[in-house]
Image (spheres, grey):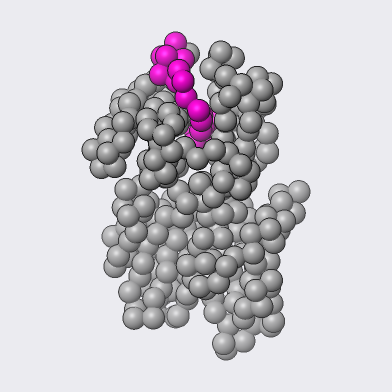
Amino acid sequence: MSAINGNTTVVGVIGDPISHTRSPAMHNAAIRSLGLNWVYVPFHVTPENLPSAVAGFRASGVRGINATIPHKEALIPLVDKMSPEAEFVGAINTLVFEEDGRIYGDNTDARGFLRAMEEVGFPSPKGSKVVVMGAGGASRAVVAALARAGASEIVVANRTASKAHRLADELSDRMGVTACGCGLDSAGLLKAAEGSALLVNTTSAGMHTHDALSLPDELFAPTMRVYDIIYAPPETPLLRQAANRGCQTLNGLGMLVHQGAIALELWSGKTAPVEVMRDALIESLA
């Protein structure tokens, strides 16, 4: 990356807080690799300042912005158009400021989720039954990805069963996939997950040692793949339990890399250097 000058293109990430973000390390490494006169900057934007911040980005010629908590849902009324994924998920994690002045909102989480699966050789979910634990924003991106990839049946399991049922009903209505909801109690989950090929955790449970999910060993058939979208720690208690039962496992680091790579491709029109981004992210987490 050359010195910043009057021709430097600015991209970045907004959040509140933002000091924890690893995205600048990942994206600036990619920018250097591609030889772009760009810089990726973290911006601390509070909720009350979000509309003025977005207007300022547009006015000042910023090319693109990633968004993290708590802005993903609040960006929806601030864009001129958005992708089908963002519309279904109800959240935007990437803004593209187009040359005609319009703002395009996208959600790259679903595609990043699938690319990470493909990368490690997880079988396609097409024609398979899958279980997704959680019913929040991350879950919405994951179930949208699985539905678009052709999953035959999606079970949404959540501590509050009513939220799982609502998401499953919406998924069935809007995307035409067979879906049902259930609670996270052992008996109900065991019954609902019978015959599933993939189990995905989209909750924050397992990010800290005191809040790990308590799941019965019988849930994990050796043929099941288990995907936890948490990336730190790299092996959550869920993944450890699944591995001990003979399951192939995957954490969320690849999803984080690929959703970022897709955003960079949207902004630049160039193929993102995924391995460069992965190495920079791993180094930043050390």
Residue 15 shows up from this direction: yes
Q: Is residue 279 left or right of residue 215?
A: right
Quarter of the view holding residue 249: top right
Query: Is 122 colored magenta in this rendering?
Result: no
Q: Is residue 37 left or right of residue 61?
A: right
Residue 241 on image: x %, y %: 64, 22
Residue 266's place in the image compared with 108, above or below, is below
Q: Residue at x 65, y 19 (%)?
A: 245
User: Camera-side residue: 67 or 251?
Assistant: 251
Q: Residue at x 47, y 74 (%)?
A: 63
Residue segment shown in magenta: 187-205
In the rendered image, the residue lying farthest to the front is: 127
Q: Is residue 139 left or right of residue 280?
A: left
Q: Residue at x 47, y 24 (%)?
A: 196
In the rendered image, the residue lying farthest to the left is: 173
Residue 156 shows up from this direction: no
Image quarter where the N terminus lies is bottom right
Residue 259 on image: x %, y %: 52, 55
User: Camera-side residue: 273 or 25?
Assistant: 273
In the rendered image, the residue lying farthest to the top is: 187
Residue 84's place in the image compared with 203, above or below, is below
User: Camera-side residue: 120 or 5?
Assistant: 120
